Amino acid sequence: METDIIFEPLKFRTLTVKNRILRSSISGRWDNYDGSGTQARINWEEKFARGGVGAIISSFVPVSIRGRIIPNYATIDCDERIPFWRKVGEKVHDYDCKFILQLSHSGRQQDVGGVENLERKPLSSTSSTEPLHGFPCQAMTLHEIKDTIQDFADGARRAREAGLDGVELHSANGYLITQFLSSGINDRTDEYGGSLENRARFLLDIIRAIRKEVGNDFHLQFKISAIEHNNAVTFWEKKGNTLDESIQICKWAEEAGADAIHVSVGSLFPHPLNPIGDFPFEIIRKTYDAMISSGIYTFRNYLLFRYWLLRPIFSLLWNRTKKSLPPQPISGEKVEDETIKKLLDAYQGVNLRESREIKKHVNIPVLCTGGFQQASYIRKAIEDGFCDGVTIARPLIANTDLAKHFQQGHDLPPVPCTYCNKCLLNVIENPLGCYELSRFDGDYEAMMQKVMSVFEPNL
């Protein structure tokens, strides 16, 4: 039998993953308010390891309490967190799956600020208010920048001491490192602002600090928004970084000590192109109220989401960038179901063109995220040099055993992800899971049983 490239090992400089399917970073409120972890988090990660992915990139793990996007995410901000993450890693390793901890800091992009930010503004590269939700912030001093760089380095050390397999820097999707990288956000006039070299300094300093802390034999990758589309919704804003600028950042990061690149898109989260798909108003009108106190524009947004007469205004802004996307760069096997075919054609592999261009200019593996769930499509993307492996979030929430379906020769799972994005818009208030009732044949109880299964002591 001819070897399937999807299930060939993916070799990084100091780490080998058993296949080319990685669970992408996706976040749920599984943990305690103080940042300590729970059994639900362990159960959550175990689901994907048992389902056959080669590696798991953890959800957003704050390197400091002040830098979390929302409470009830486990942190890596102190040595007391090491034993918990060791338990997570050990459980994942039971399934011959690697665990890569995503080191993160929200900057100004905070859905719910938490008690740590009640009387002070979140830190950022800028003091300019975030334009979509109106999150306030204050520009970091040089001293705060140095402290935060060390926070990332300390987080990497703790991940290594926990026996994890590597770390990823969340330098994409509008979080703190993006706020430094982005020409559309960073308005500093010191050595961390202005030119591309200066804007990249924060990321490169973090990479060098991590290497100093953990040495050269511990896996370190970073996630980047290849094209930011910073004005996708708020059209009056600057566009942000171009692909050429991101290619240069990737080359510098490789020189500084990065082992791999994870390609994404967008300078905020969620973004019209990340995660690309539907925008279910019936969900967000019920959950967005939790964010009203977080930003200056959140009550305006809440009204746009809640009242159907106002929704076309937001839909027009949200969807305009998607309409300008070029056609798919590749295609998978023919799909008979016309509805599924249209979904795959519209939403699968949205970042492949950018991934391929970055891959041409670096010598380290390139991972790509973007709605992958078809084996023939993933296979062709890897074989044709668009990427070395893919990372998947929503389709794995829908089918945690997706990799096993591929291994059994299926091109698609029996009930594919619909890209409805109900999972992500529920997560502000509700447990992360698949909330697309049609995937459960209209059986609400069955859907809830699946969503709530993460809280069962023994899966």
Image (cartoon, rainbow, N blue to C red):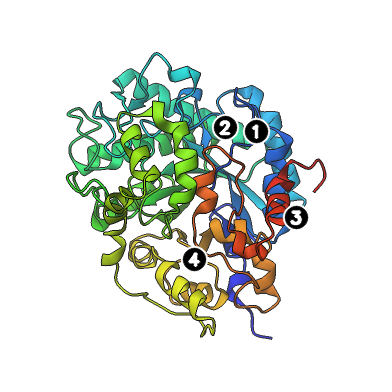
Query: What residue lies at 49% left-to-right and 48% top-to-bottom?
Result: 283
| Quadrant hosting residue 199 | top left
For marks 1 and 3, the one nearer the N-term is 3
Sequence-earlier tag: 4 or 3:
3
Q: Secondary structure at mark 4?
A: loop
Name the residue furthest top: 119
Which labelled disc corresponds to residue 95? 3
Question: Which mark lies nearer to you, 3 or 2?
Answer: 3
- Marks 4 and 1 sit apart, C-alpha to C-alpha, by 28 Å
Is residue 47 positioned above or below 63 on the image?
Answer: below
**Residue 431: % across, % down:** 62, 42
What's the amino acid at mark 1? Glu
Work out whether residue 327 or residue 217 is closer to the camera in this orientation and state it. 327
Label 3 near label 4: C-beta < 8 Å?
A: no
Separation of marks 3 and 2 at Cα, in angstroms? 24 Å
User: First in sequence: mark 2 or mark 4?
Assistant: 2
Say what secondary structure mark 3 lies in: loop
Left or right: 169 with respect to 3? Answer: left
Residue at image mark 4: 388
Q: CA distance from mark 2 to mark 1?
A: 6 Å
- 187 or 18, nearer to the observer: 187
